[in-house]
Amino acid sequence: MSRRTILGGAIGVAGGALGAASAPPAGATGTGSSMGRSGVGSRWAASWATAQTAPTPVDIDATTGFTDTTIRNTFRLSAGGAVVRLRFANPFGATSVVIGPVTANAEPVLFGGEKDVVLAAGATVVSDPVYVAVPDGGDLTVSMYLPGPTGPISFHRNVHSTGYVGNRPTNSVFLLNGIDVEAAGRSVIAVLGDSITEGVGTPDNANLRWPDQYAARFRRRPAIANLGISGNRVLLNDARFGPSGQSRFDRDVLSLPNLQTLVVFLGINDIQQPPSQTHPGRLLQGYEQLVRRAHDHDLEMIGATIGPFKGWIRYTGELDQVRDDVNAVLRRGRLFDQLLDVDAALRDPADPARLRAAFDSGDGLHPNQAGAQAIALAL
């Protein structure tokens, strides 16, 4: 295959793991991607995942921690199976945390045969296999008891679906950062993204984020790890918006079992969020470093152009020129193995700096569910 491709159809549908396991929807075209090979041989595939951040003072639950508390969340799995396992991590914690008992769809989750486990500060723990059947695109409800006191814990602020701390609703997920299914030849894809990937602009509890809509295109779904963090950048860390894409690459990406393809969908926040990066070359250099790191681990790398944002509160013509300059270089096809042209999929033909009206969630930056579908159809 050519490793320098602008995508207009489903990735890898003509060859590689995805092509062997599923077929594209009618009318979709393939690029012949090999989908990478880094995870071949692993039993597990990351069917749901989230990227964690450290709590800030306004994140009361995660900052205070929990004592004698049950937390319950329901997760939409991209790929299903007859057996799952759970991954918990506390990279930003300062003390050990006891987790358990835990259930998954009411089935007990064990850790080395025990009902609870100690999660050391900075560590990850993985459950025993849980024999609970979940279909492709099905839901898994995880209930986790924390005897505490936990102290401040790692979390994802907003997964755009409602869970419960006791009887109180929350959109956050605490400690749990991955759900795996048996790989069984499935393609495994991760998306290193920002709020557009996380789901801002799409309805809560609807599972209409663009990675969800991409997975739904296939009769046999790929396993997709959504690593979007609102406000996230390629280059700069932020207390609220998390470690940059470069900083979190090892922890969030390389920890995923059986990963074959990485989509990098970051950059708009480097440009529009103070302090703005106004040097296109710096942003492109950041992408290049991610590509080098990924290729060291034999991952297929897909980049994304930066979408329109005219109408957003921090839009200026000068910042938009930076975006155009970055996109122009990406379209030359010399950086990523393949390119997802988000800009082309979303822009208004009459005003290319602006989202098409039918795709605008209302703020000029975040696409709505129709815009998310347009991204999913472009990959």
Image (cartoon, grey):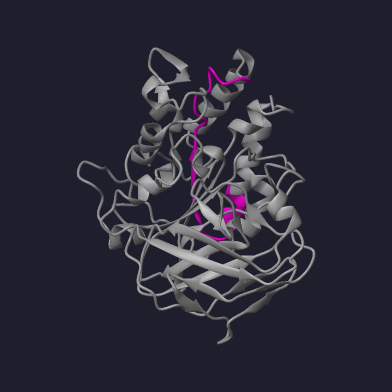
Q: Is residue 135 visible?
A: yes
Q: Residue at the location (64% across, 59% down)?
A: 251
Residue 195 at x, y = what percent? 55, 39
For image coordinates 40% across by 48% down, the residue present is 212
Residue 185 occupies quadrant: bottom left
Q: Is residue 303 magenta?
A: yes
Front position in the image: 173 or 245: 173
Task: Based on the picture, tell me whether residue 142 belongs to the magenta stretch.
Answer: no
Residue 201 vs 3, above or below: the answer is above
Q: Nearer the viewer, residue 227 or 142?
A: 142
Judged left or right of residue 64, residue 256 is left
The stretch in magenta equals 291-314
Residue found farthest to the front: 167
Q: Residue furthest bottom?
A: 113
**Residue lying at the far right of the rendered structure:** 94
Q: Where is residue 85 drawn, in percent x and y?
A: 49, 72
| Spot occupied by residue 284 in the image (x, y as percentages of width and height) | 62, 35
Q: Is residue 243 above or below residue 120?
A: above
- Figure disc tally: 0
In the rendered view, does 329 fall on the left or right side of 223? right
Q: Is residue 171 left or right of residue 44?
A: right
* Res 39 seen here: no
**Image coords of residue 109 (percent x, y):** 51, 77
Placement of the C terminus among the 4 image quadrants: top left
